Amino acid sequence: MVFELEIVQPVYNPRDNWVEKYLSRYHELKSLFAGINLRIVFVNDGSTQNFDEQTIRLLQEKIEHLHIVSYPKNKGKGYAVRQGVLKTQATLVLYTDYDFPYQMHCLYNAYQQLKAGSDVVVGIRNKEYYNHLGYKRKLVSKACNFLNKVFLKIPHTDTQSGLKGFSAKGKELMLSTTTNQFLFDTEFVCRAYQSRNTIVSTIDVELREGVKFTGMSLKTILTETINFTSILIRSYFGKLKS
């Protein structure tokens, strides 16, 4: 079967009873994309809980078109997304978190932008999003936005919404990223803006009601600081261009 759209969703140690909630949102997704051949690509990023064989069988029974990528050791979100993208067949691809943190129409809007000719679509979080963040996470997000503006010269400062879309051209850029943790998003967007003749567009994304955020450890902050420095150096010396 030829798929018009595929959605890549990385999964790492999902919450208890997550499948029931996922399936409810999946049906909402199917209704929104009625008439479009859609495939879900799950990437199990070395989960040690709540993604066992029983879970996989249930997902396969309930989801019409599903491909699961799985490996035993956690590698990071950037690595997981690339592994999922490698398995996609459609010319248009979206990726988002497994819990669908944004309103479903945001996914549809991203798809429409791709259909209209964009190579890369970037979700931009509104002010309401930041009101739901804890102090540490809000501080880190604002710091990333500041660094993107001052050092990477990205036209918009928000690169971390976790909802992106791309065409075949954008797919090549995604697969050329090397950051394995969260800042792969920033590297991807930076590559897109530095790439010649690449059409980048943005959409506003709205947080879905009831979304819960996980904490951010000091180790994660230090790792991402190193990753940002690497992206900055490569950007400065033109190593992100294609």
Image (spheres, rainbow, N blue to C red):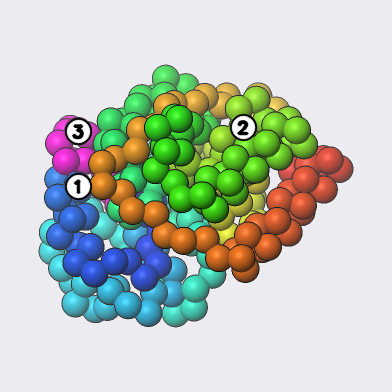
Identify residue for label 3. Answer: 32
Asked whether 32 or 205 is in front, the reply is 205
Q: Which residue: 36% across, 70% down?
A: 13
- Residue at image mark 1: 25
Q: Residue at x 76, y 54 (%)?
A: 230
How busy is the neighbourhood of tag 2: few (under 14 within 10 Å), some, or many (20 plus)?
Answer: some
The verdict on residue 98 being magenta is no
Q: Earlier in the sequence, mark 3 or mark 2?
A: 3
Tag 1, which secondary structure? Answer: helix
The residue nearer to you, when weighing 55 against 21, is 21
Residue matched to label 2: 157
Do tag 2 and tag 1 residues touch (Cβ < 8 Å)? no
Name the residue rendered at 15%, 68% in the picture.
58
Tell me where the magenta segment starts and ends, as one range: 28-40
**Nearer the N terminus, badge 1 or badge 3?**
1
- For badge 1, the amino acid type reads Arg
Q: CA distance from mark 3 to mark 2?
A: 29 Å
Residue type, mark 2 in image:
Thr
User: Image point 35% across, 33% down: which residue?
Assistant: 206
Q: Name above or below for residue 138 compared with residue 83.
A: above
Q: CA distance from mark 2 to mark 1?
A: 29 Å
> Does residue 147 appear in this view?
yes
Eye-nearest disc, 1 or 3: 1
**Residue 84 to residue 91: above or below:** below
Q: Locate residue 191, reporting x and y percent.
A: 67, 39
Q: Is residue 15 above or below residue 106?
A: below
Looking at this view, name the residue that lies furthest to the right: 237
Q: In the rendering, at what x and y percent does residue 1 appear?
A: 26, 47
Q: Is residue 89 left or right of residue 174?
A: left
Left or right, residue 38 beside residue 111: left
**Residue occupying the far front of the picture:** 135
